[in-house]
Image: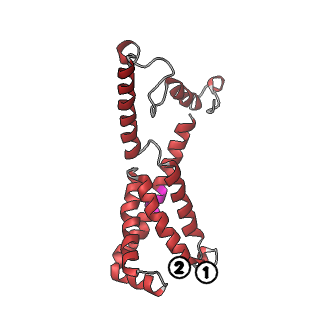
Amino acid sequence: MKRFVFDVTALIARVTLGVILVAHGWQKWQSGLGATTQQFTQTGVPLPEVAAAFTIAAEVIGGILLIIGFLVRLAALAWFVVGLGAIAFVHAPNGMFVSDGGWEFAAGLAALCLMLIGAGGGRFGIDGIIHGAWSRKRERRRLDREGIPAGGPGGVPPQGTAPRGDMTREDMSDIDSMFTDDPTKRRPPNR
């Protein structure tokens, strides 16, 4: 059950961050690479043309990748680098508050990126689907090598078991109990 909660919260965080990044990157894209490069030059960003191109790509492409949940760690790492640069070269001299041009917004996004780099984007995305399929295939090969049948009758895993990445029947029962109208059947979600 805890894994399901993580997956839902990671999905919400990933999509929210992705939308913010795409919006900011699209704004820079519409202004043009030249205008963004000029702005980076004025704020003292080193290699402003390269930094502007990388920032636009990290925000637009990385944001889309975060929304769909593909290459989440790489997309988050790209913007984490952008965020550190933004804090160091643009926002730090202005103090903390975003209303004064400070670093709080960039730091919040960078911290969220750091969380996604460390924990991943959860199962509700392309990375999660690929990992789940790969894990099930690896588990089937392991069982075949050890001569263990893949499951009970009809290949269905025994009660309460599932290959890594899948919810068990007990997980599904816990989810159902959270949404029942009968208060006597409700159970706390964490076992």
**Which structural element holds mark 2?**
helix
> Do the numbered discs 1 and 2 sit on residues whose CB atoms are within 8 Å?
yes
Residue that appears at 41% across and 54% down? 67
Q: Residue furthest bottom?
A: 42
Which disc, if any, is residue 94? Answer: 1
User: Type of residue at label 1?
Assistant: Asn
**Residue 13 can be seen, yes or no:** no
User: Quick one: 93 or 102, which is closer to the camera?
Assistant: 93
Q: Alpha-carbon neighbours of circle 2 within 10 Å: few (<14), some, or many (≥20)? A: some
Q: Check residue 171 for magenta coloring.
A: no
Q: Which residues are magenta?
A: 16-20
Q: Check residue 19 for magenta coloring.
A: yes
Q: Main secondary structure of the magenta part?
A: helix
Q: Which residue is mark 2?
A: 90
Residue that appears at 35% across and 21% down? 144
User: Quick one: 50 or 60, which is closer to the camera?
Assistant: 50
